[in-house]
Amino acid sequence: MEIAILVLHVLAAACVIGLVLIQHGKGADMGAAFGSGASGSLFGATGSANVLSRTTAWLAAVFFLTSMALTYFSGHKSTAKEGVMSTYTEPAAPAKPAEVPATSTGPVQAGGGAKNNEIPK
């Protein structure tokens, strides 16, 4: 439903922009009143202004209503969905390194602490 309203909203916005650009300014009506080429148009001298302005008003109303609907939908999203952090668990505490039992073999000798007759495995 929200996507359909969004599509209608974008189309209404594009049509309002197009209709505003098509419409003549207030100064163009004076030229039409004195016989310039606009009086022989399809809607007459002032008929096109009425149709375009009414259509623009209706499309502006549609744009306003779809804006309100999209605002409502964005504010009332379902909270039943879980977020990214909902599955987060605290990591376990790091394990302490195993303590090496102290031996009373005396001071450490050069060569890595091995005695001359011992070969490290």
Image: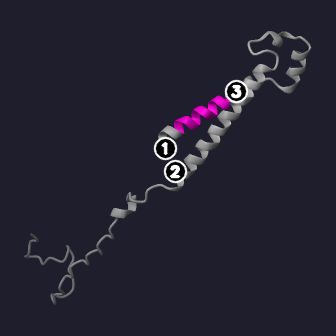
Q: Which tag, 2 or 1, sits closer to the chain's start? A: 1
> How far across and down, in percent of the image, does residue 99 sit?
21, 82
CA distance separating discs 3 and 1: 26 Å
The stretch drawn in magenta includes residue 7: yes
Pointer 3: residues within 10 angstroms few (<14), some, or many (20+)? some
Look at 61% across and 43% down and name the residue there: 65
| Span shown in magenta | 6-17
SS for dot 3: helix
Look at 31% across and 70% down and name the residue there: 91
- Vertical arrangement, residue 58 with respect to residue 80, above or below: above
- Please name the amino acid that badge 3 sits on: Leu
Look at 70% across and 31% down and name the residue there: 56
What colouring style does the render use? Answer: one colour
Q: Quadrant of residue 83?
A: bottom left
SS for dot 2: helix
User: Which residue position is annotated with label 1?
Assistant: 2
Q: Quadrant of residue 32?
A: top right
CA distance separating discs 2 and 1: 7 Å
Query: Mark on residue 73?
Result: 2
Q: Which tag, 3 or 1, sits closer to the chain's start? A: 1
Look at 57% across and 50% down and name the residue there: 71
Query: Mark on residue 23?
Result: none
- Please name the amino acid that badge 2 sits on: Phe
Residue 21: tell me if it is visible.
no
Pointer 1: residues within 10 angstroms few (<14), some, or many (20+)? few
- Vertical arrangement, residue 50 with respect to residue 33, above or below: below
Figure quadrant of the C terminus: bottom left
Query: Mark on residue 19?
Result: 3
The stretch drawn in magenta includes residue 64: no
- Pointers 3 and 1 in contact (C-beta within 8 Å): no
Left or right: where 93 falls relative to 22: left
